[in-house]
Every structure is written in structure tokens, then in C-alpha cells.
């Protein structure tokens, strides 16, 4: 299942900090900060008379030290920006750093946006200083990724003590997608063409195996694809919904979804397969292979960022996924066979609403779409199906021209498809 959401635009972090940290200290003029040899920085004189501005400047310093530490691969410098007064904060910092490095995030640009809310007297007493939450815009990408960096907003908790600000915690901002590395410790497996991440070794190895298999399945149909597949398996439903910024319960019956990391629809955005472990774990070897290869097809062909007819997107993904396994058509098309025997052939190809979880019969819509793509390959050849699909990805509003390339029309093809469904239902 491919997902689309609105993109968001953020600013990037100033790039000179890495060079500054490399020489140990750097003084620009009386209105700039001094970066000390231990990674700390002192606030400018101009903001010391304004407590809020001084606090915000110190928070920016902490973020900048972390960005530099990630770029240089220095865990000690990264953790130095975290609060050390509680075990929870120390563990949070260690987990975040290790997750970022394991995923191959070599740079994490941050931009302090604004303070959101104070934490109250009790929490400030516990932390030993002025404590508050602030929105921080983050930009990051995976190592060797040719995609655009993901852009998201995260809520940081800071505490000010004397002349320094420390990070206490970070969590997803309200109504924003959460990065996978924000949660608990990840187990990551990488290959030249795949990245699999989950919270247990068993889950990671299972997804890693299916991703590698999906690369082979994909290239048997779309040999021109040379990209990388990335999949996450969050531990809980709550984590999955946070990663997708989804309404609770909306993915309860979905085994996996392909979407951009930050929810944008920008071409070349980072795309990820998010696995719903509660559903995926109930699938056997055949079902799990079909699901991951299906989602991998979306990821590899750009379907996650294109508003295209879903019978083409989902049907083609199933053509690759179902076509990779040896299953009798009486099993793989059972919902269609049952429906045609009860109600006759459908009047039209499935529309986008038929693929909504609220439609009541997702299995039927997916099978109808798969059989339509399968029929194109049977009538015109697999290469023609691939050309048809790529044409629709590039020109999703011009389905008529896509059919003309096949030498037919949507109306004529639909009639042929309906006859093929009736013939299938009459067998056995």
C-alpha cells in the first residue's frame, strides 16, 4: 500500500560548525559565539541580558554540538550535550546515537524553532534548572542514499544549568511523523541494496531476508531498478502510528505500508517500508514474501509519491509479489472467484475508494487489480505491462494514452477483463 502526504519545507543548519570543531576553537567577532576545545560554547554578550534569548542560544549550541558529533562519529561529544543527572536521559542519548549510527545517518542537521512550553516547578526542581520543551526542525538522510533528506519536526526537552543547556529528552511533535530512531534500541542489518531495522534480532533477520529476496523478485520484472530498499518494523502499534502520524486503529489490518519517511510527496523523497509486526508476524513464508515484494515494488517504482490510479499501483505490485510465489490461482484469486459467482462480474475496474480500509473488502479490490495487470501481461506481454505501468507513474492523469500504447482503450480492456473474471469463476 502506497502512502501520500503533504510535504513540509524547513531550513538547513549552518555548515561551518564542523570546520570550527576541527580546529578546537574559533572566534569570529564580539557578536558571535566561541566554540571551546571541549565542544562547549559560550553565549554572545548581546543575549546575556535577555534570559529567554540567552536560553535559546544555549539550546542552539547544544544542538550544534550534537550535529558536529554525529558528522565526526564522536559518541562522547554527542552524549556530552545530554543531561547526566538522570539515568533515563543518559540511556536516551545513548540509544538515539546508536540508532542513528546503525541506520547510517552520518549527518543530522537541526534548527531550533521556538520554545513551546515550560515543564513546571516540580519538574524543574527534579532536573535542577529551568526546563522547557521546544520545536526543533531536523533534516537527515541515510548513508549512500540518493534520495532527498527527510525533513521533520521533533519536540526536544531542555534544561538550563548555569552557562549551559542540556538535552533531557526528545519525542515526536504533535501531529508530526516520528523518526524510527527516536524510539528504543534498534537492531539493524544492512546489505549493498537493503537496510532492515527492528527492535529484536529475530524480526530484523526475517525482514532482512525478505528484503534481499524482494530485490531478486523485483529485478526479474523491472531490471532497470538499481536502488536500495529500507524497511522498519516498530515494536508496537503505537510506535507504528507515531511513525506514520496515523489515526489510532487505521493500520490494524495492514501488514505493511510504503511511504516517504517524512510524509512528503516530493519526487526523490526517502521512501521506507513500515511493517506492522502484529499482522506481519501472522503471515507464513509465502504471505510475508508477497507482502514485502509488493511493498518493495512501490518503493522501487515511485508509487509512494504519485497520485495514480490504485488499481494500477496495487495491481502491478501484486503482479510482482504474487508472481514470485507458486500459488494456485484458486487460492490467490479466491475473493474474486467467490464474488463473481455470487454477484457476477464487476461493472468497472476498482476505483481508489475501493482500496480504502473503510470499503469493507480490501482483499477483493486487490485481487481485481492484480488480475487486471496480469491480463495486460498475458495479452500484450510483460514488457508491455511494465511500459504501461511506467507511463502511468509518469503521467498518472492520462490513463487513456497509456491504454492507447497497448493498442486498446480502457473501455475495451475493461470488457475483456470482465470476461476473464467470468471465465475464471466458471472453472472448477
Image: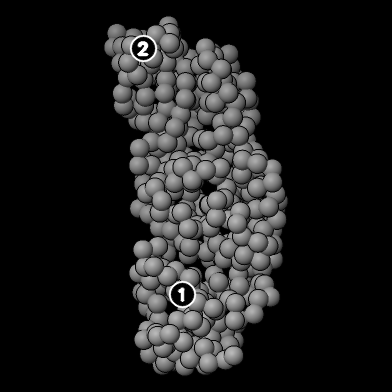
Q: Is residue 361 visible?
A: yes
Left or right: 405, with 318 as reference point: left
Closer to us: 83 or 46: 83
Q: Residue at x 31, y 26 (%)?
A: 116
The crowd level at tag 2 (other Cα within 10 Å; few <14, some 14-19, many 20+) is: few
Give residue 205's position: percent from left, percent from top. 70, 49
Whether the residues at callouts 1 and 2 have beta carbons within 8 Å, the answer is no
The crowd level at tag 1 (other Cα within 10 Å; few <14, some 14-19, many 20+) is: many
Return the mark for residue 122.
2
Judged by depth in the image, the label closer to the viewer, 1 or 2, is 1
Q: Residue at x 48, y 71 (%)?
A: 363
Q: Residue at x 64, y 29 (%)?
A: 73
Q: Which residue is mark 1?
A: 364
Q: What is the tally of numbered marks visible in this picture?
A: 2
Give residue 50's position: percent from left, percent from top. 28, 12
Q: What colour scheme does the image use?
A: one colour
Return the mark for residue 177.
none
Left or right: 180, with 163 as reference point: right
Quarter of the figure that contains the C terminus: bottom right
Q: Is residue 380 visible?
A: no
Give residue 365's position: percent from left, percent from top. 44, 74
Closer to us: 424 or 292: 424
Q: Secondary structure at mark 2?
A: helix
Amino acid at each position: 500500500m502506497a502512502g501520500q502526504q503533504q510535504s513540509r519545507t524547513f531550513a538547513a543548519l549552518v555548515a561551518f560548525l564542523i570546520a570550527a570543531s576541527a580546529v578546537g576553537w574559533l572566534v569570529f567577532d564580539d557578536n558571535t559565539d566561541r566554540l571551546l576545545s571541549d565542544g562547549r560554547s559560550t553565549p554572545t554578550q548581546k543575549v546575556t541580558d535577555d534570559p529567554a534569548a540567552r536560553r535559546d542560544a544555549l539550546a542552539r549550541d547544544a544542538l550544534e554540538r550534537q550535529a558536529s558529533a554525529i558528522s565526526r562519529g564522536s559518541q562522547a561529544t554527542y552524549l556530552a550535550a545530554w543531561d547526566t543527572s538522570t539515568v533515563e536521559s543518559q540511556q536516551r542519548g545513548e540509544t538515539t546515537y546508536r540508532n542513528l549510527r546503525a541506520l547510517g545517518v552520518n549527518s543530522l542537521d537541526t534548527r531550533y524553532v521556538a520554545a513551546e512550553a515550560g515543564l513546571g516547578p516540580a519538574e524543574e526542581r527534579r532536573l535542577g534548572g529551568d526546563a522547557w520543551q521546544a520545536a526543533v526542525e531536523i533534516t537527515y538522510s541515510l548513508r549512500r542514499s540518493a534520495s532527498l533528506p527527510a525533513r521533520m519536526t521533533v519536540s526536544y526537552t531542555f534544561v538550563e544549568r548555569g552557562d549551559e543547556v542540556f538535552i533531557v529528552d526528545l519525542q515526536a511533535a504533535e501531529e508530526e511523523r516520528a523518526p524510527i530512531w527516536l524510539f528504543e534500541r534498534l537492531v539493524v542489518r544492512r546489505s549493498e541494496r537493503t537496510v532492515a531495522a527492528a527492535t529484536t534480532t529475530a524480526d530484523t533477520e526475517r525482514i532482512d531476508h525478505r528484503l534481499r529476496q524482494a530485490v531478486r523478485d523485483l529485478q526479474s520484472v523491472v531490471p532497470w531498478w538499481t536502488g536500495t530498499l529500507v524497511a522498519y518494523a516498530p515494536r508496537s502499534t503505537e510506535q507504528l502510528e507515531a511513525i506514520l502520524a496515523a489515526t489510532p486503529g487505521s493500520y490494524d489490518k495492514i501488514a505493511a505500508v510504503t511511504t516517504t519517511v517524512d510524509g512528503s510527496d516530493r519526487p526523490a523523497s526517502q521512501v521506507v517500508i513500515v511493517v506492522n509486526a502484529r499482522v506481519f508476524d501472522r503471515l507464513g513464508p509465502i504471505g510475508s514474501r508477497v507482502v514485502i515484494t509488493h511493498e518493495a515494488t512501490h518503493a522501487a517504482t515511485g508509487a509512494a509519491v504519485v497520485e495514480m490510479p490504485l488499481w494500477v499501483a496495487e495491481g502491478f505490485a501484486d503482479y510482482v509479489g504474487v508472481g514470485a510465489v507458486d500459488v494456485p490461482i484458486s487460492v490467490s484469486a479466491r475473493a474474486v472467484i467467490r464474488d463473481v459467482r455470487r454477484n457476477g462480474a464487476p461493472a468497472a475496474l476498482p476505483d481508489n475508494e475501493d482500496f480504502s480500509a473503510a470499503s469493507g473488502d480490501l482483499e477483493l479490490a486487490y485481487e481485481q487489480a492484480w488480475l487486471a495487470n496480469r491480463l495486460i501481461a498475458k495479452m500484450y506481454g510483460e514488457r508491455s505491462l511494465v511500459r504501461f505501468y511506467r507511463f502511468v507513474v509518469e503521467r498518472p492523469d492520462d490513463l487513456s494514452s497509456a491504454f492507447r500504447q497497448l493498442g486498446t482503450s480502457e473501455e475495451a480492456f475493461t470488457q475483456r477483463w470482465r470476461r476473464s473474471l467470468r471465465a475464471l469463476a466458471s472453472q472448477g
